[in-house]
Amino acid sequence: MNKPLIGAFLAALLLGAGVTPAVAAGSAQAQKSATETAPAAPDAPAAKAVTFAGTVALSNCSGSVVRSPDSQPTDPALVLSNGHCLETGFPGPGEVLVDRPSMRTFTLLDAAGTGVGTLKASKIAYGTMTDTDLSLYELTSTYEQIETGYGIKALELETAHPVAGAAITVASGYWRRTYSCDIDGFVHQLKEGRWTWKDSVRYTPECRTIGGTSGSPVIDDATGKVVAVNNTGNESGQECTDNNPCEVDENGEVTVREGINYAQQTYNMVPCIGTGNKIDLDREGCGLPKP
């Protein structure tokens, strides 16, 4: 996994002195993004500028304020991150959390990556590391209140399966850093330690995500919509161990790709978001595991 980080001291050890993540609103002067960009294909559509607007910094991970196409301005806003970023610890295989009280806070970023305010959770609406690796927090603020108070709109979730070859940007609110590459393909099963994820997104090598980028939205450059949530990468070439996921195809063949990073698709969770942004795992088309 793109490991959650514990405090700014560890973060500095990982990336060197002078790089400090945001852990609270107004805590540090915003840093300019260091963007790693893959060359665009000659026939690639004109990409929309991807900024940090709508991304958030957690205490140990990244995330984003997201909405479904049917979310209303007066609905309580949702924050998307990873299941392994939950303050309750890693959910075990088969474990699904629904409607758990939470007092977690998130630093909301503007387009330049400046922390402009603190958002508060009322609960963990959903969290799991089974089949996927995601968490959804319900906030005490509505989309309307966030837009009125900070001038920032939520990122919209894509409703369709992403496409191989699409240009993407991974936007880390924790590091105020973006990574640009393409979707290289999709993995039937991605195994890491005790966990197995299905139909994962594999990046081309240019997206060299690191610890603290866990939970970052993966944004389609052409549409500006969220197609996945960044979660892991093979760090040292080991096979199917913690921090070294392996790919397993439909025939059970195992492939290890050292240095390659991955994300979990989000289109299949959109049907699970019902009226009032409430998570309803029984809704038609909902692809999330149930408790």
Image: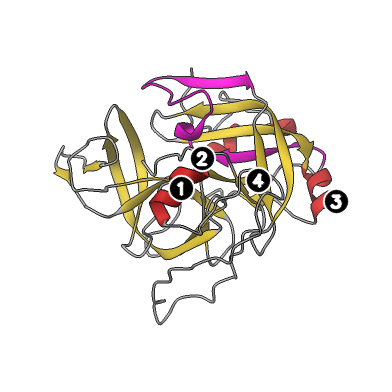
What SS does tag 2 mark? helix
Q: Which residue is tagged 4?
A: 65
Taking 266 as reference, is 236 left or right? left
Q: Which residue is tagged 2?
A: 7
Q: Which residue is tagged 1?
A: 11
Q: Nearer the viewer, mark 1 or mark 3?
A: 1
Q: Does residue 34 show up magenta in the picture?
A: no
Instruction: For the residues labelled 3 and 4, say whether their Cβ atoms are less than 8 Å apart.
Output: no
Q: Which residues are magenta?
A: 74-101
Which mark, residue 165?
Answer: none
Considering only order in the chain, which callout, 4 or 2, is on the residue closer to the N terminus? 2
Which mark, residue 148?
Answer: 3
Q: Does residue 86 show up magenta in the picture?
A: yes
Instruction: For the residues labelled 2 and 4, say whether their Cβ atoms are less than 8 Å apart.
Output: no
Instruction: For the residues labelled 2 and 1, say whether their Cβ atoms are less than 8 Å apart.
Output: yes
Relative depth, front residue between 93 and 16: 16
**In this orientation, does residue 168 appear?**
no
Q: Residue 83: horizontal and vertical position, in percent?
A: 47, 32
What SS does tag 4 mark? strand
Instruction: For the residues labelled 1 and 4, say whether their Cβ atoms are less than 8 Å apart.
Output: no
